[in-house]
């Protein structure tokens, strides 16, 4: 528990240093938290021992846990064999019950983002530049509606906890893909104009689901195949695959 608190505190502190204006706050925090100092001193000792034994700097091997944003959200395996979970961005918020319209609007936006609901008023997403910006903007919107909100960066206490969180998110997306697949299979029996309308609508629904699909489930491929089979039967051309440079520009 103490390690989790330390890692979270360091992440939050480092994230706020540019706004606070100087690095002296880091030294102040370290001197004020003996547990944090002890951990860093122990890590320094381990690194020195390893460097002396091998004559080389320690390295890190990254293991991707997100198929959608693998370049930012990852677990890290140290040379000692220990594994650190990937970083997550958290939004904690509270809104007045009345009026209910802003609360409903925030709930709908959170659902579109595909957040993991950790507790009442606490949601999380795998951290990258896009998800951080999305939750930052949502926090501003909540505060403008007379609510309170804060955005945090943290890591789960264990890789097992992160896997459970990812599995729950994948299961939610899997249910959405199944619904799309079933609609596509049902629409095959419609007349051609209706099939064309259904195919276009379901393609757009797939795009929406994939934007919030951080840990793609096996149901994804079946849903895509069903929609494309419907589109092909209705005489709609397959979607154009963006070139690599075009994908990079969109990011």
Image (spheres, helix red, strand yellow):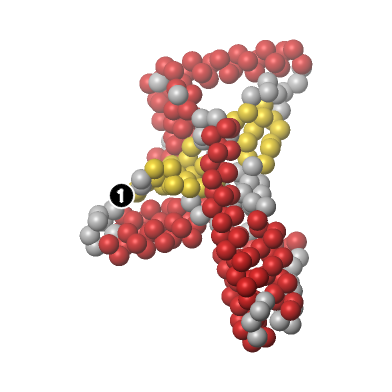
Residue 246 visible within the image: no
Give me the residue at 43% from left, 53% from top: 136
Position of residue 29 relative to residue 187, above or below, is: above
Quadrant location of the N terminus?
top left
Image spot of residue 105 (x, y percent)? 37, 63
From the viewer's side, name the closer residue of 189 and 79: 189
Give me the residue at 74% from left, 12% from top: 53
Q: Is residue 59 left or right of residue 206?
A: right
From the viewer's side, name the closer residue of 154 and 129: 154
Position of residue 36 relative to residue 107, above or below, is: above
Image spot of residue 164 (x, y percent)? 55, 39
Position of residue 60 relative to residue 99, above or below, is: above
The residue beneath circle 1 is: 94
Give me the residue at 74% from left, 77% from top: 232
Image spot of residue 4 (x, y percent)? 47, 28
Give me the residue at 58% from left, 38% from top: 163
Image spot of residue 212 (x, y percent)? 56, 57
Name which quarter of the figure residue 225 lies in.
Answer: bottom right
Residue 75 visible within the image: yes
Name which quarter of the figure residue 109 lies in.
Answer: bottom left
From the viewer's side, name the closer residue of 72 and 97: 97
Quadrant location of the C terminus?
bottom right
């Amino acid at each position: 528990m103490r390690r989790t608190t330390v890692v979270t505190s360091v992440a939050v502190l480092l994230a706020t240093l540019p706004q606070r204006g100087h690095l002296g706050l880091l030294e102040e925090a370290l001197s004020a938290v003996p547990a944090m100092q002890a951990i860093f001193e122990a890590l320094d000792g381990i690194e020195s021992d390893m460097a002396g034994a091998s004559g080389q700097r320690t390295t890190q091997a990254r293991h991707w846990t997100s198929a959608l944003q693998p370049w930012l959200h990852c677990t890290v395996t140290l040379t000692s064999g220990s594994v650190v979970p990937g970083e997550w961005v958290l939004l904690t918020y509270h809104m007045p019950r009345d009026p209910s319209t802003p609360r409903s609007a925030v709930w709908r936006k959170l659902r579109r983002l595909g957040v993991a609901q950790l507790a009442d008023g606490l949601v999380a997403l795998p951290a990258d530049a896009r998800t951080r910006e999305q939750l930052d903007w949502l926090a501003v919107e909540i505060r403008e509606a007379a609510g309170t909100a804060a955005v945090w960066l943290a890591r789960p206490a264990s890789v097992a906890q992160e896997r459970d969180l990812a599995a729950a998110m994948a299961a939610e997306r899997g249910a959405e893909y199944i619904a799309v697949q079933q609609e596509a299979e049902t629409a095959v029996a419609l007349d051609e104009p209706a099939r064309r309308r259904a195919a276009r609508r379901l393609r757009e629904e797939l795009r929406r689901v994939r934007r919030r699909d951080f840990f793609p489930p096996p149901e994804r491929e079946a849903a895509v195949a069903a929609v494309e089979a419907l589109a092909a039967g209705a005489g709609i051309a397959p979607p154009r695959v963006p070139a690599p440079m075009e994908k990079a520009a969109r990011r």
